[in-house]
Amino acid sequence: MESTDLNEGDVVQNDSEDVIKEEDETEKEEGEDLTEDAEALKAELAKIIVHPPSYEPSPMEEFDQAEFSPSYKDNLPKENLVLQYAENFRRQMVQLYRDRKPLFLNPVNECGVEKFVCTTIRPTQLEFKELYNWDGAAEFVADYLNIEPLKPEYELPKRLISPATVLKRQKGNCFEYSTLLCSLLIGAGYDAYVISGYATKETCLADESRDICPLLKKKEEVKEEAKKKEMKKYNVKPPRDLRSKFELKQEAKREAEKQAEKEKLRKEEEERIAEMEKPPPDPYFGLRVHAWVLVLSGKREVPENFFIEPFTGLSHPMDSSNYLGIESVWNNVNYWVNMQDCSEGVKGLSFDLGDPTVWEYMFPNNDKPLLKVPDAEDDLNDMDDEEKTATSGRTRENTRMSMDDEEHEVEKYLDMPPSWVDALKLSHRDFQMRCPHGKKTKVYKRAKLEKFAHYLMKDGLISRLSVYEDRELTELIKVHEYYAHRSDKLTQRLTNHRTGQVCENFDPGRPRCLKEHQFKSSAPGPENERIMLFYHEARVDGLVKREETQSEMTEEYINRDDFLYYKYVEFGKRAKKFGPQETSTANKGRPINKMIQKFHRNRNKPANEDIAELIFHVAEDKIQITYHTEDVRIAASSREFLKPPNWDEKGAVLTFSPEMHQTFQVDPTQPANKQVELYEMLMELLKAEEKCRNEVRDSQNEVRSILDDRTKEEAASELDISVYDTERNEKAKKHRRELERQQLEEKMRKQEMDIDYLAPFLAKIGNPEKLTKQQAFSLKEECLADLKQRLIDKANLIQARFEKESQELEKKQAWYQQNQVSMGKEDEEEYLTYCKEAIFRIHILDLRLTRHKEQAPHKYMQLEQKLRNDERLSEFF
């Protein structure tokens, strides 16, 4: 029976024969004349043009090789040996695992030279303290560099640029990001590795538009368990609960059903929104190549393993769904290949790099502890004595042989050569820029984060977080701005565009110790709703909070000597006046209706005399006092005073009557106060009311002053620049240049004065621009005469010192002649020492005088020659 199947060769042959037949028929048809309809059809078909697709890979950036050190252009013998070792390792992996993707082992560098990936890591610890912790280093790398996605995204890159070059050009792909970050982390002491694997499309392209901004994530609050109150034996028992337990259960059941319904609706809404926001299917899912960083626990007190995404600088757990598989892991010491199944992503993978069953390492000198193989002695327990003896002998022999082999193998071990990358360097100015060109924008889910370099913006803005209602970022909800280096100590400003509420935060150091200011943007002026928080430790009055509305003001205090902790003021409406309003009346503030002061307990006073609450009814001319409650009482004593009719008149004599005072005493046995005591108490209360009124006016003036200062500060927006920042401090620059200029001028002037021997004589005649003949002769004679006189004076001075020393020596010798008989040995030695020193001084003076006499005529002749050759006098001589 003949087979009807065709093999591949027959199909190709038949296809080629059909094509030849069609070409022959076309040639025959072209020889024939076409009708008009056929010509029209041919013209219509000619309009259809098909362009075959073509893939042109983007050209690789070229570098000037003259800028790089020799280690970039050549390989050391040890590096070549490592490359051969890696190639052998690659061949073995390809032979054993033909279905695996190629490993990322030896890409070329910026000079086109193959380099092993482990030697591309350059562990470095930079001098900036922000880079010492992993979160600061990861955030810096994510902000400092621009992303270059892999092309094509499903293949490993052909080139891996060194971390030093990446820092200079400020851009790179995921492998270059990870290599730089790993270099910084290893230099800071972390157990960090670069991972080559696969990730989702959003992770590979750094698409965070579906993620919540890290600044908006609420920190996990640790819920403290409520401590149960211990019931003591003699405590009063609580009253019995007479409510129906059945009704309580039914109520709790209904409440639980309502909560379950709400939770169900919430979950359904979240699922609906998640389904709407779900990204479209990715045709390259599971094939997109990506690199990230692994940090293992142990070093730097890291409690557990975690991933770091280099594009975002954020940490991810070990079961993150962003990563779909791992091919290999490496650091600056070794290279490991993952032998585990990644069908479920990275979930459940073991990162015990010392386990050879799940990680295949390249170099034998693995720094991770290997799994121990059970000793042979453990199996001897189940054997007979003869078998044990024979087996132990063979074991010892095998042990000796293995030890000898290990000694030879250790010598043959190939360790990692040093990194070929230049030292990582980063200037202070580049570190402060943080972002390319000083700006960077990130888009999150319903939020946008803008980052700016320090001192880049005139108002000191370093970041701005805008929160929106929709995903299209059109309906703005609130803006959170962060500032630095401001003279007014402003650090944060939160503006809610829906409510119009503004909240500003300040660092310590402001004149009035303002810490936080909340107000409405529509009413920023005084006498409106606002809340002010203060640094009470720096204030004399201990003010913590001031809350103000159009009709009220409340103040809270801490740690005051008078135990005041609360003050409340109720304002009335201003009386409307027709005509021009006086300025003095406008500045007096709102009329006060009531003032309340509250005090803490003062243990140095009895409770019946320690005021707890003091109320000034200004509008009603009444004062109420409530005292603290005694420990053994359940009620507190109180008093009430009525003000005299003429209390506000200056110099008036105030009268007091029993009808003006009412009191409630908890202790009836306590004696009543005398009228004189009550009168003095009323006088003290009137003074306290006046003092409280003045403090309220001072508080109002302080609010106005703070608002005026804020207006001026926002208009100026001055920044504080450190005196050590020589690049930005313009005032220090100008001052330093002015001092240098003055020093240079003073130096030049001194040099001119030292050289110009005619300067003092010219000053006597007024420093004329041109000298006459008579003046020239006069200057010459005066200058020579002055030199002659100085030479004579110097000779006389030396002669006077010579004669003085000679006379003192003669006196000493005469004294010695007189007292020689009665002198002791010490006195005689002292005399001889003095004579030696005196003779030495006399000899020196004699030499100086002789040399001066010899040099004086020559000096005189040199000055005379200089005067003759001087430009100002040469024309007259």
Image (tube, grey):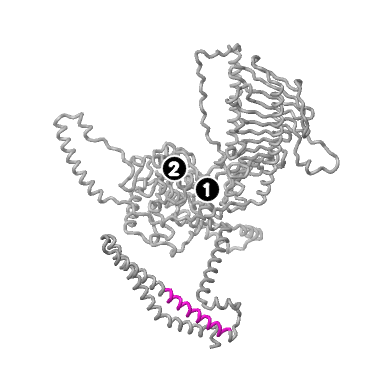
What segment is highlighted magenta in the picture?
775-797
- Camera-side residue of 379 and 310: 310
| SS for callout 2 | strand
Q: Which residue is mark 1?
A: 205
Q: As displayed, is residue 261 above or below residue 495? A: above
- The residue located at (68%, 27%) in the rendering is 614
| SS for callout 1 | loop
**Which amino acid type corresponds to the residue marked 2 in the rendered image?**
Gly
Q: Is residue 170 left or right of residue 530?
A: left
Q: Is residue 134 left or right of residue 51?
A: left
- The residue located at (58%, 33%) in the rendering is 559
**Which amino acid type corresponds to the residue marked 1 in the rendered image?**
Leu
The residue carrying pointer 1 sits among few (fewer than 14), some (14 to 19) or many (20 or more) residues within 10 Å by Cα, namely: some
Q: Is residue 864 visible?
A: yes
- The residue located at (38%, 75%) in the rendering is 848
Main secondary structure of the magenta stretch = helix
**Of the two numbered discs 1 and 2 in the rendering, the one whose residue sits closer to the viewer:** 1
Q: Which residue is mark 2?
A: 325
Question: Residue 613 in the image: x percent, y percent?
Answer: 66, 26
Question: Residue 268 in the image: x percent, y percent?
Answer: 59, 31
Question: Residue 333 in the image: x percent, y percent?
Answer: 35, 49
